[in-house]
Image (tube, grey):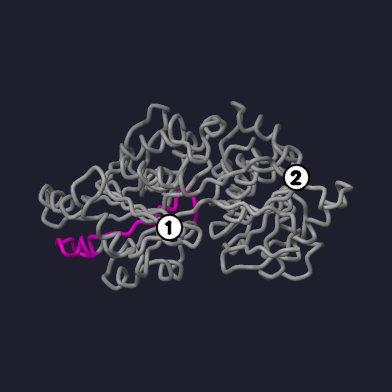
């Protein structure tokens, strides 16, 4: 046996796996030597626009009133964006705006929650540079269900009715921040996604995350060209407008590997080009067993779908996936709408589920899109060939989630129990297949949802 390390939400855990397990990892990126200097340089010499300072000065000059307002859009806690410390990208923006005369009480930090829950006060304090809060900037959670907080901006070419958070629309200066990493629907996160789906109304998600759009083969990791999900998000973001973006790329240690600032589309495309080089995982053949973790993003089962998607690109048809997560969110599975769709998938299976949600009589349920991503995995393997485990999962959570119920096989409920989970899952697979583990090919996707298996031959 040999030991592998799994980086999860609150820490790393060592796990024993068979000696012949192949550890597959992405190329990764070299962390920048001086993150603060890199951020400063990106603001001063951005892509496709004048410097951030010049952009802000012009917006203030053109402002029709004497007290300009500004909004800085930030990600929620499901993304490891560096918003504090030496690598923090939020304070440099706030500081620049303050120096140019934008008063703190006229500056809003807007959390692009999309359809996710609002951040709690303690989460806000732990995420952001304390100087931002001490300066008096207001932190606001976007609420996709509050129609009074949304502004209508027309329709897209795909007939999406565009409703955007009014705090954003009404601001004189609009700045987006975020992390650019691979995304299994939109190709990559960051850039336009801070607005769509980050700041759109709930009804606007019905087309953006609709089953037909997500069934498109180009709605996949690292694909922008021809990806309808990306194209729709970009069109919505362009309707809302953005004066400047500041995005970063990270490596597996969450160190900054690049800072990309400037015009919405050009700066984002430059960041995506870097991500493609960083996150690709070379896979020469599919495996009988794929072991993977949900990483930092796996706060709940909803987010852990990203690890399931990565595993689907490395597993043999009919193979097995062992997925470890640490679901520390308020509800370990996810929101009620997600849980509802997930139970339908478990009851009906992937083919019937997809037929159901594509039916003209189907009423769209928010967050069904993530369940559709799980369905793609179960088109590769039977649902009971998924071994999913989180220390926070109870038997009730397993009842609503596809996969093998691991609760009777694991004695304790802490981070260290993940080692026992993997051991029991491997034992069960050997028993069910009637083969010794040495007869089965096994790989471990070391980077979890962040590494994207490429070119299986």
Q: Which image quarter: residue 2?
A: bottom right
Q: Say if the magenta span includes residue 107.
A: yes
Magenta region includes residue 100: yes
Seen in the picture, residue 359 relative to 110 is either above or below; the reply is: above
Quadrant where the N terminus is found in the figure: bottom right
- Where on the picture, by quarter, is residue 331? bottom right
Nearest the camera: 110 or 33? 33
Range of magenta residues? 95-117
Q: CA distance from mark 2 to mark 1?
A: 32 Å
* Disc number for residue 288: 2
| Residue at image location 58% in from the left, 53% down from the top | 25
SS category of the residue bearing label 1 = loop
* Secondary structure under the numbered disc 2 in the rendered image: strand
Compared across the picture, whether 104 is left or right of 372 comes to left
Q: Is residue 442 left or right of residue 109?
A: right
User: Which residue does the image show at 44% across and 53% down from the upper left?
Assistant: 113
Closer to us: 366 or 196: 196
Residue 137, placed above or below residue 380: below
Residue 86 lies, in percent from the top left, at 34, 69
Residue 235 percent across, percent down from the top left: 36, 34
Q: Which residue is mark 1?
A: 30
On the image, the x and y values in percent for residue 201 come to: 42, 44
Q: Which mark is first along the chain, 1 or 2?
A: 1
Q: Residues within 10 Å of mark 1 (few under 14, many from 20)?
A: few
């Amino acid at each position: 046996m040999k030991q592998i390390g799994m980086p999860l939400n609150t820490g790393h855990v060592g796990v024993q796996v068979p000696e012949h397990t192949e550890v597959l990892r992405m190329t990764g990126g070299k962390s920048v030597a001086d993150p603060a200097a890199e951020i400063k340089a990106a603001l001063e010499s951005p892509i496709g626009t004048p410097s951030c300072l010049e952009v802000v000065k012009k917006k203030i000059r053109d402002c029709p009133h004497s007290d300009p307002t500004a909004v800085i859009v930030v990600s929620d806690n499901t993304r490891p964006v560096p918003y504090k410390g030496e690598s923090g990208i939020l304070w440099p923006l706030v500081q620049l705006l303050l120096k140019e005369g934008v008063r703190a009480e006229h500056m809003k930090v807007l959390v692009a929650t999309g359809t996710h829950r609002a951040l709690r006060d303690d989460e806000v304090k732990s995420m952001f540079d304390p100087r931002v809060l001490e300066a008096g900037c207001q932190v606001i959670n976007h609420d996709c269900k509050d129609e009074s907080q949304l502004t209508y901006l027309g329709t897209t070419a795909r007939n999406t009715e565009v409703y955007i958070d009014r705090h954003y629309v009404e601001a004189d200066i609009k700045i987006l921040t975020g992390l650019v990493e691979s995304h299994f629907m939109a190709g990559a996160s960051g850039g336009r996604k801070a607005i769509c789906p980050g700041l759109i109304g709930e009804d606007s998600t019905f087309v953006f995350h609709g089953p037909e759009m997500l069934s498109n083969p180009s709605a996949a990791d690292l694909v922008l060209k021809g990806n309808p999900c990306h194209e729709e998000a970009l069109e919505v973001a362009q309707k809302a407008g953005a004066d400047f973006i500041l995005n970063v790329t990270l490596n597996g240690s969450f160190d900054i590997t690049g800072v990309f600032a400037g015009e919405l589309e050009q700066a984002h495309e430059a960041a995506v080009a870097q991500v493609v080089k960083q996150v690709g995982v070379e896979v020469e053949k599919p495996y009988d067993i794929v072991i993977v973790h949900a990483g930092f993003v796996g706060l709940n089962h909803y987010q852990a779908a990203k690890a399931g998607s990565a595993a689907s690109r490395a597993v043999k048809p009919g193979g097995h996936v062992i997925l470890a997560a640490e679901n520390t969110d308020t509800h370990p599975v996810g929101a009620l709408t997600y849980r509802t769709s997930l139970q339908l998938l478990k009851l009906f299976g992937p083919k019937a589920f997809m037929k159901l949600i594509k039916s003209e009589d189907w009423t769209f349920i928010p967050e069904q899109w993530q369940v559709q991503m799980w369905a793609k995995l179960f088109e590769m393997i039977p649902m009971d060939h998924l071994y999913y485990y989180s220390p926070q999962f109870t038997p009730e959570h397993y009842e609503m989630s596809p996969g093998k119920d691991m609760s009777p096989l694991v004695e304790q409920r802490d981070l260290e129990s993940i080692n026992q989970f993997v051991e029991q899952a491997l034992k069960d697979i050997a028993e069910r297949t009637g083969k010794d583990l040495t007869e089965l090919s096994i790989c471990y996707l070391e980077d979890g949802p962040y590494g994207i298996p490429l070119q299986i031959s």
